Amino acid sequence: MKLKDIGEFGFIDKIKNGCLIRTDGVVQAIGDDAAAFVSAEGKLTLVTTDLLVERVHFLRDATTGFNLGYKALAVNLSDIAAMGGTAREAFISIAVPADCDLAFLEDLYQGMRHLATQYDVNLLGGDTTSSKIDLVINVAVVGSVSAHRMLTRQAARPGDRIYSTGYLGDSRAGLHLILSGIAPETRDHKALFETHILPYPYLTEGQFLAAQTGLHAAIDVSDGLSSDLGHILSASKVGARLWCERIPVSLPLQRFCSQFAFDAVDYALAGGEDYTLVVTIASDQALAVQKSYEKHFGKPLFELGEITDTCRLELVDSAGSVRPAVAKGWNHFK
Ligand code: ADP
Ligand code: MG
């Protein structure tokens, strides 16, 4: 069945079930000219939006609707996480080509509902139009954060320690497998593939970190560590040194890199779409924050370097020699 068989309004009727996940604060959900909800009192409202375009961000034949819907929401939740916030309402606009199956779109909403339920986020509205060739999905998420807890890119200070909430480079390895047409059959390949397909939004971790004293800057790694840390450096007018040996590279990625003769550190530095949070913490608080994070979540907060006053991004190898790092990562217009 295609969208033309039920029309725009038939489609909206079909997908709206199960979109209201949390009722508190919601005055009008899907079904009127606009959504209405109460903003969190005394807090800042966060708004973020991400656009996914077929053939630029995904290949329709290479993904399921579920995975695509999940990812479209996850990348937005990740942006709210990087501000230290709570996600509340999501808005989904889609432009649908005539050859797109209704089942694919229903599956797409299943993927979004699945993740939205985990984080208590409503799917509260959107727009539906036709498209000539490509499927286009835009998700916008509204969230909130206390003004004094908001994490930004511009708050890093020389001496801060730099941490990542997760391994880096796995997602890019998963993408490599997809683009090379390698079906993920081994445990390692499956793990890398999964990280790329179903990115984990570090929302709970972001809120926890934002509540700690000594937390300075934060960003989510969407384009690659060197590129995204570079945004913190330019916004904060500082530099950084990363210790190559301590850049968190997972065992599956280490084995993948030996298999394909890639340098694991380069891979982790340039690999996009990991969606881990990279944060900087005042040096005198850093160890305490790391310890309480690890106790709370039962997983590591990886320390990988420090902020300097040089305005350069540098890499320190195991022998202690320092070399400049070039910001390599995804850039749409280059
Ligand atoms: P209008 O024509 O007044 O803009 P629409 O017919 O586009 O209204 O939308 C009707 C309702 O359905 C609104 O609540 C809108 O937010 C919601 N909606 C439309 N398309 C989508 C979609 N793809 N996903 C979620 N909600 C949608
Ligand atoms: Mg409309």
Image: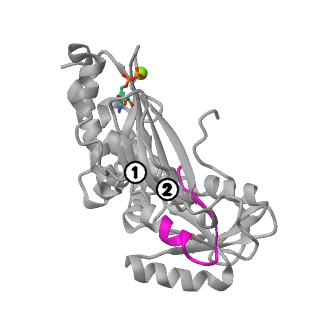
Label for residue 25?
1
Q: Residue 100's quadrant in the figure?
A: top left
Q: Residues within 10 Å of mark 2 (few under 14, many from 20)?
A: some
Q: Position of residue 178 (x, y in %)?
A: 35, 42
For the C terminus, the image quarter is top right
Residue 150 in the image: above or below residue 75: below
Residue 324 in the image: above or below residue 129: below
State whether residue 138 appears in this view. Answer: yes
Q: Write down the region rendered in magenta.
A: 206-224
Magenta stretch encompasses residue 122:
no
Q: CA distance from mark 2 to mark 1?
A: 8 Å
Q: Position of residue 85 (x, y in %)?
A: 51, 59
For the N terminus, the image quarter is top left
State whether residue 177 appears in this view. Answer: no
Going by the numbered disc 2, the residue's amino acid type is Ala
Label for residue 40?
2
